[in-house]
Image: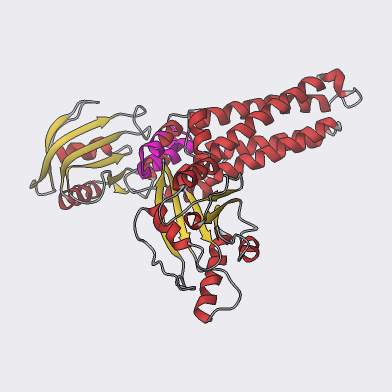
Amino acid sequence: MNPIDTIAAIATAPGAGGVGIVRLSGPLSLRIARDVCGRELQPRHARYARFTDAAGETIDDGIALHFPAPRSFTGEHVVELQAHGSPVALQRLVARCIELGARHARPGEYSERAFLNGKIDLAQAEAIADLIAASDTRAARAARRALDGEFSARVEAIAAALLRLRVHVEAAIDFADEPLDTLGGAQVKRQLAAVREQLVALLAAAERGRKLRDGLHAVIVGPPNAGKSSLLNALAGHERAIVADVAGTTRDTLHETIHLDGLELTLVDTAGLRAGGDAIEREGMRRAHAELQRADLALLVLDARDPQAGRAEAEAAVAGVPLRIEIRNKADLLQTLPRAEADAVYMSAHNGLHLEQLRLRLRALAGVDAGEAAGGEFSARARHVEALQRALSCVDTATSGVSHERLEIAAEELRLAHGALGEITGTVSPDELLGHIFSTFCIGK
């Protein structure tokens, strides 16, 4: 990207609407806007104007707003041309801006410039995209908190503590003949323990934020005729899957997305797991195993009348899935309902018996209740979680190094932990990472 380029793009959603906005950013913004509007613009004053083409023909009329650098979203001169929301008129406006020296903005380039000009950090930039994509109120609030800098502030506080510790440890290296305890070793150990505690808490919060943003991939698995498709229909609230008493009715994977108190849950119904079956059924079971390879959660469905039937095959299939709920379905056919068990939910997908208990268990596994209780929930991404995990691992290694007075190792691990946190906010970010992140944004943002 040439930093002196002026960029232009439609900033409003695709399609017709009451109002549409064309946004300019860069050094030529004000000059281009003056030529399009035929009048001067004062900073932060809305001006009515007729937007004209090169021949003086009116493209549309509307409002023009100038936000001078550096007090704008991108930190550059920004102009917004607010016209009627006609896609044709807006495209003509952009074309006119291109004629006058601008170029088409790349996806996410406005937010990228805001980051590069120090208006927002990288986590806040990603929160903009999360806010735009939020599918419910809870996700929007979480993204808004991240955009307001709540996540970044916690990351930066831990990074500052790590930097202070690193300075202390590296200073102690110069006095290798002295015992560490005489150089404040006890204080370093206490501070390392405090930093670790903060990292663990932040990692848990970021994992909840990731689940809130990305949702959970939940695979329904179990032997034939256990009621897997009925469970999918019950959770979805409509007849999404074909239900029959014939074993092998479900031959392929079936996906359905539901929202559970703000948590997006992708449910995958799979073919019943059993030995044998024809070629199509075996292919269905192969696809079930493939879905389980990337599952966050397995819903292990067994027949409550004989929960041992097919259990071995199902448990072997879900062995690598991080989270699991055992569901003993068809409990309405039991003469007496067993007491509730900590590791199993007795329910009936047919008549909804104890369906709410399953929903509560799903909330608990996803950390929904913990996030609400903690307050200040923010959105996060998988890369944030991975960076925090690396930082935590480095802090653990540094702690071991301090305990054994291997200070060079401790200092290096503290440096790596600090760098991992810097990747979250963008203080340490390779160019290819920035390109990947901003390429996922919409054009005009």
In the drawing, does residue 217 fall left or right of residue 388? left
The residue lying toward the viewer, choosing from 387 and 315, is: 315
Q: Hey, which residue is sitting farthest bottom in the picture? A: 279
Q: Is residue 411 above or below residue 97?
A: above
Could you say where residue 226 lies in the image, as x and y percent from the top left? Answer: 51, 63
Residue at x 21%, y 51% (from the top left corner): 15
Vertical position of residue 274 compared to residue 235: above or below:
below
Q: Is residue 139 above or below residue 179?
A: below
- Image point (37%, 45%), residue name: 133
Query: Could you tell me residue 379's position as x and y percent?
Result: 47, 38
Q: Is residue 337 rendered magenta in the image? A: no
Residue 367 percent coordinates (x, y): 53, 39
Q: Nearer the viewer, residue 255 or 243?
A: 243
- Farthest-out residue, left: 57
User: Does 129 lie within the magenta span?
Assistant: yes
What is the magenta segment's predominant secondary structure?
helix
